[in-house]
Amino acid sequence: MTFEGIISMLVIITSLSTKVIGVPHQISLILRTKTVHNLSFLHYSIIWVTYLLWIIHGILEDDIAIIISQGIGVLVSTVLLSIIFYFKFIYHHE
């Protein structure tokens, strides 16, 4: 395998790990503790927009790998943002 191939494989692994391990772990932690005061809604909103722009780029470049990987990012980020929004602005701990 070439150096470029190794780097490509590492990019895929780390990118998917963030989306299928990192974000679900964060969601689990929020649901367990019912607290989000250390999380920035703005920060995760920007991440969501970034994933969405990558999907548009993937569509324009006709690159299914980008579309799928960033689509996963949009899905898990939408769930995370919804939970952060709920606990920051709706849920009132008694």
Image (cartoon, grey):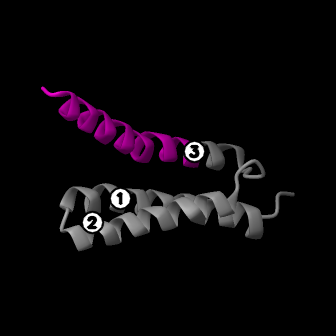
Secondary structure, mark 1, is: helix
Mark 3: few/some/many CA within 10 Å (<14, 14-19, 20+): few
| Residue 78 in view | no
Chain-order first, disc 3 or disc 2: 3
Mark 3 falls on what kind of element? helix
12 and 4: which is toward the camera: 4
Residue 64 horizontal/vertical position (percent): 19, 61
> Which residue lies most toward the front here?
3
Q: x, y (%) of residue 8?
A: 25, 38
Q: Amino acid at mark 2?
A: Gly
Residues rendered magenta in the picture: 1-27
Q: Residues within 10 Å of mark 2 (few under 14, many from 20)?
A: some
Which residue, given by chain and number where applicable, does mark 3 sit on?
26
Marks 2 and 1, the one that precedes in the sequence: 2
Q: Which mark is residue 70?
A: 1
Q: Secondary structure at mark 2?
A: helix
* Any part of residue 87 in sight: yes
Q: Is residue 63 above or below residue 35?
A: below
Q: How far apart are labels 2 and 1 at the CA level?
A: 9 Å
Q: Is residue 48 left or right of residue 94?
A: left
Name the kind of residue labelled 3 in the image.
Gln
Q: Residue furthest left?
A: 1
The numbered mark at residue 58 is 2
Tell me which amino acid carries mark 1.
Answer: Gln
Quadrant housing residue 81: bottom right
Q: Verify CB contact (< 8 Å) between mark 3 and mark 2.
A: no
Q: Residue furthest right?
A: 94
The percent position of residue 48, horizontal first and vertical second, equals: 51, 63
- Residue 17, compared with residue 35, is above or below; it is above
